[in-house]
Image: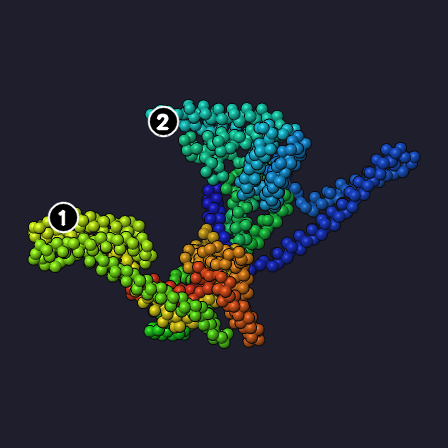
Amino acid sequence: MRKKWLLSLSTLTAAMPFLAVACFNDAKHQKEVESSDKKNKKIIDKTKKALESKEKNNKLLAHEIEILKSQNHASEQKRENLEQQNEKLQQEIDALKQQIEQFKGKQVKKSTLSARKFAEELKKFITEDIPSALQQQQPEIFARDQSLIEQITKSVDATFEDYEKLNENVENMWNWQQLILPLISRAYVLLNYTSNNGVPVTITKPKSAVFDLLFDWRINDLQRIIEGIEANPDSLYDEKGKNTKTQKLNLLHEIKNTYQDLKNSSSLFMHQISNWAELESEAGAKQLFIKTGSTHQREVLPSFHLPNFRISPFPIYQTIEDEEFITKVKDEFLKLNIEYQQWLSSAKKYISSVRFKETFDEVIKVTKVIYSSLIDPNNLKYANDFNTYKEFEKFVDDARSLLKKVKLINPSLEKNVIDKEVDYEFDKTKDGFAKRFEEEFKPKSMKNDKEAQYLYEDFYEYYSKFIDRVFRSPKATFVQSYDRYALYLSVKSEIDKSKEIINLAKDLGVEFNDEKIGSQKEKFKKLMDSERKFIDSTTKTLEEFKSIVASLEDNTTVSSVEQAKTIIKNLVEKSTNAKEKIIKNLTENTNWNSLFEEDQIKKIQELFNKHSELTKSISSDENNLEKLKGSITKINKSAHDINDEIFAKPNSITADLYQTIEDSRQSIKRYERKLAALSETSSIIPAQEVIVLLRYWQNILKPVKDQLMFKENHPDRFLSAYFIKTFKELEKDYRFKEITGVKADEKNWDIESEGTSITPQSLLAELKALEQEYGKALFDFMKSKASPQYPRIKEALKQNVLVAKEKYYNWLKGLKARGVTLPNKFIWFGSGSYLYPNGFDQPLKWVASNLLKYYAQVYANTELLVKIGTGNFYNK
């Protein structure tokens, strides 16, 4: 039976790691509880005030009595009267205290041992005792390290703030352990750091019996480990042909004795801190038996072969010492567990939906207390959430009241409504949103113009498929239905927000012509001129080079000795001239040497030197015609080899140059196409305004998104995965990061002027201020369109946009005069930076639809997260 209820409660807790909402109330019961609570609170408060007044009077009377005694006052009668009044007042105080206890209810008996008290003792030792002793005993070291000590004190104080309202219950036991043990380590570090040549200050605070419990904790668990190993078969410890059981037992006995010896040898609190910290350090004895990577460090090392062994609970913790109360908690919690698991059998079909956030949170808060108390019978003694029987009874009443409330939830009605809405609006055959989308954007996507290519083709294809996917999404359960509905809201919002940008110029009654188009045209013309100059200059150099190489060869038909000698003489002379000319060009002429790498220049020189040596080696005294012809053939072959090495071979010295010339010709064509497309693509969407709004989102709205963002362990797995994937893909996108991640560095700002006050930091600050003003004006204008007040406030909002727009673009245009250029093209974007496949050397596509999608996704999904986070779950 115990296994059954424990499993049910475990299922409940596992099924609900986050979220829910429902606003049904058992009004009558709630009012009765609240009325009773308020009445009791008023009585208690009134009684406490009377008690405080009487205690104050009692102290004053006692003080006066002491004065009278010390001064040997003459009026003995007055003293006796005062003592009688004091005695009567004390009786009244005791009666009032008893009355308060009656109203508060029966107190739960608890141990005086407390993690909180011990933590506070450690805190005082670190923040008061050590600094005070150091100041008295080592004033030089105190003065040297005073700022460090103050930092540590502030850090400890800040840490304690997180624990002020943390109860010592089962759920929080690890948290308290993680406060206390690091505090001991911190005290140890501080003692060592402030020591004088290794000798720490002496703090005469005596050893603590509570601290000894930590040593006993380890000693007792080590004994349990020893007994567990002794009970295991010896064969478990056979390792590499050797049995290690005795070796392990000896080690554990040694560790146990070390803990015992250091416990016994500690005569002061500071000794306990040092000895414990050394045993528990990364190089200490603890590492020899505890698997530190295990959950809450409660497992031992695998080599001990005790897989089910668990380190006992943290010993310095307050416990319940009231068997009657423990029995009462167990009985009531068992009943509540059964009641909640019966409800869960039907609720699991809908409760994990983000739609029921508040209900889920309320249920989890209750079931965590129940589950943590029942999962282990020993946990009941840690039910420290309750100080009185009445507090516990109220918890039980509230838990049952909550159960009544959640049982009233009927998600089937909501499911029918949202299913019908999505079925109608996203069915392309019905007169809803999907059909209107198709009628508006499909024809635009099929046109043969730049608007279709750069915007509507991809925009229509992406959202048409998305609409179909949402329409076909499963809806068997409420969770699936609401996930489908949330996607419907997201897609619909993305499309609507995209249309707001597309129609922004029309709505404002202004033209958003690309403010950068003039500078981009100038840029492309300069780039084309540069490419043409390179082609002309390089072609001329190569032609001259070819002419020099060609001069090294003579293929004239030889018929006489004299003719042959003349040819050879001319070839020798040409070889010498060519060599000198080549060397001079390669060393002195920048048009030449800038075209070749050092190793290429060296290779060219080697070829001409070798050829020159060949020609000079031919004897001028030779009269044999055949031999002279052979010499001419050798010279021509050498010249031919030079031509091959420099020009003819596929991997020749100039092959890359010819390819570069071809690349430059293609670049000119690409720039010509971009130049022609500039006017057509510059006003498809107001690109710079989209970028301003993206950076406005990054700086202003992203923190809101981050706060409301679903975690990976969210019970609504589908919806959490959708949000996480959407934003992760955006944040990984190179261009999105360039747009939203402008920094104060040389990758974003190039400042030509030296000795100027302009810095990347100052420029980024100016950009942020202007874009925040312009972004807010744009955001407010578009957001207001859904407001009933829009006709009345439209003109004022429009003027805000126009004023901010003028200031912003004047600043951008003024950067050039200030000697500032922008390496990051997304600071000031121009439509010339779009990429469209051209069938030649440009396969990539990144156009207006991609930029618009960034905007639609971040704004639509942030808005949806805000709606869900604030309980606005439907299309309102």
Task: From the viewer's perspective, tell me whether residue 633 is left or right of residue 433.
Answer: left
In which image quadrant can residue 498 be found? bottom left
Of tags 1 and 2, which is closer to the observer?
Answer: 1
Q: Can residue 734 be seen in this view?
A: yes
Mark closest to the chain's N terminus, 1 or 2: 2
Q: Residue at x 26, y 55 (%)?
A: 581
Residue 517 position within the rendered picture, expressed as x and y whole percent measured from the top left: 43, 69
Which residue type does callout 2 highlight? Asp
Neighbourhood count class around disc 1 (C-alpha, 10 Å): few under 14, some 14–19, many 20 upward: few
Q: How crowded is mark 2: few (under 14 residues within 10 Å), some or many (20 or more)?
A: few
Say what secondary structure mark 1 lies in: loop
Query: Residue 139 at what x, y percent from top left?
Result: 66, 33
Q: Mark 2 points at which residue?
A: 238
Of residue 541 and residue 20, the one placed in the foreground of this image is 541
Colour mapping used in the image = rainbow
Q: Give the distance between the C-alpha atoms of the residues marked 1 and 2, in whole angstroms.
A: 92 Å
Amino acid bearing label 1: Ser
- Residue 237 placement (x, y as % from top left): 38, 27
The answer to whether residue 381 is above or below residue 706 is above
Residue 773: image tag: none
Q: What element carries label 2?
A: strand
The answer to which image quadrant residue 240 occupies is: top left
Q: Which residue is drawn at 20% across and 54% down?
A: 573
Seen at 37% across and 70% down, the residue is 675
Q: Residue 619 carries which label?
A: 1
Viewer-proximal residue among 495 and 602: 602
**Residue at point 42%, 64% (across, down):** 851
Q: Where is residue 815 in the image (x, y as percent from the top left)?
A: 50, 64
Nearer to us in this view, 851 or 707: 851
